[in-house]
Amino acid sequence: MDGTHICIIGLMSDLSSKSDSAVLYADDHYPEFLEDLKTLARIPSVSFPGFDPKEVVRSAEAVAALCKARGLENVEILTLPGAHPYVYADWLHAPGKPTLLLYAHHDVQPAGREELWKSPPFEPTERDGRLFGRGCADDKAGAVAHTSAIASWLKTHGSLPVNVKLIIEGEEECGSDNLEPFLRKYAAKVMADVIVLTDTGNFDHETPSITVALRGIVALDVTVRSMDHPLHSGMWGGAVADPVLALAKMISSVVDAKGRMAIPGIYKDVKKPAKAAEASLKVLKYTEKTFREQSGLFKGTKLLVAPKDLLRSNWYWPTFSVNAIQASSKKDCANIINDSAWAHMGIRVVPGMNPKKVLADLKKHLLKNAPWA
Ligand SMILES: [Zn+2]
């Protein structure tokens, strides 16, 4: 282990002056790299069901073309039945040096409510020094950060200091359902010593940061039914169990009056943040004001944790949220008792928690609190 350690230090000191010139190149060519990002962000590569999968294919092709243009080799679009395409590329001319696997994804979330966009979601637009458009940050910027860094090194030094493999996924936003079979099929191709993901953010504009962990998630769909068709509320309301009310009661049973999860034992296995994590929590100045500005939380909405625990709760505590809820619709709203109600909900899990157990406990709790059954 000692030998490896010294070798890495040697590599680092040699790298610092070289990376300085690569950084200068990157600064000089910033407008060009920004164009790369805009080109990718113009493609509406929404990977969700119901959106045109051909756009995700088009996006994979654009990413592959970018990889080629920026000096990567063996560029390939990798497919798997039923999966959106992945892009693979590499540069493997540093014998004896470690191999770095760089990850990003080229698919995006749906644009959401059009009226909330100040400029069209798929026409990247600069305002106040920032670029706005769906996927500009998450995660087409990730792909472009990789290709720009590689191009800057190759243009400056003609080679990279390590071997590099790049994998740009096409279905991260819809749950990476095929990631496991993908890794099984292409294990040899993606094998590496270290993996770096750019599907993360910086702490703020002035503080570059490395994300070392993200909270996980367990999620489920819940449907409550009480009859085989909707009924008129004036004719039937009273004796009939309303599935919307039942679902609302089930959901509200998951949290207490303070917004903390009320599932028995749910916090039992949660690990305390490590000492180093506590130390960085202390160093980072993060105020309630910044939190409110960044989240857009209204003045009259109370925080559910003490201001000193804002980062701790966002990073190290589990939480419950309801992502979607449906029973009839605004458009079809009528004086009815709905026959069914549906919601998608989940718990963000943190180190120490067993996701399978958390999901089972959530299910059990919901069923126990289902009224009128
Ligand atoms: Zn992402």
Image (cartoon, rainbow, N blue to C red):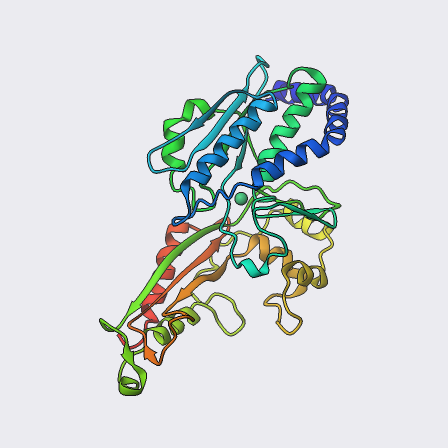
163 left or right of 373?
right
- Residue 126: image location, x then y, percent: 69, 47
175 left or right of 8?
left
Q: Give the camera-side residue of 104 and 1.
A: 104
Q: Which quadrant is the C terminus positioned in?
A: bottom left
Q: Which quadrant is the N terminus positioned in?
A: top right
Q: Give the camera-side residue of 239 and 50.
A: 50
Residue lying at the far left of the rendered structure:
228
Which of the 4 image quadrants contains residue 208?
top right
Which residue is depicted at the point 58% across and 60% down?
116
Q: Is residue 46 above or below residue 314?
A: above
Which residue is depicted at the point 71% across and 52% down?
282
Q: Give the camera-side residue of 320 and 86.
A: 86
Which residue is depicted at the point 61% across and 42% down?
211
Count of numbered circles on the image: 0
Which of the 4 image quadrants contains residue 147?
top right
Q: Is residue 228 visible?
A: yes
Which residue is depicted at the point 65% across and 35% down?
35
Q: Give the camera-side residue of 204 and 358.
A: 204
Q: Is residue 264 visible?
A: no
- Residue 180: image location, x then y, percent: 38, 36
Q: Is residue 297 above or below residue 273?
A: below
- Residue 132: image location, x then y, percent: 64, 49
Q: Is residue 55 above or below residue 279?
A: above
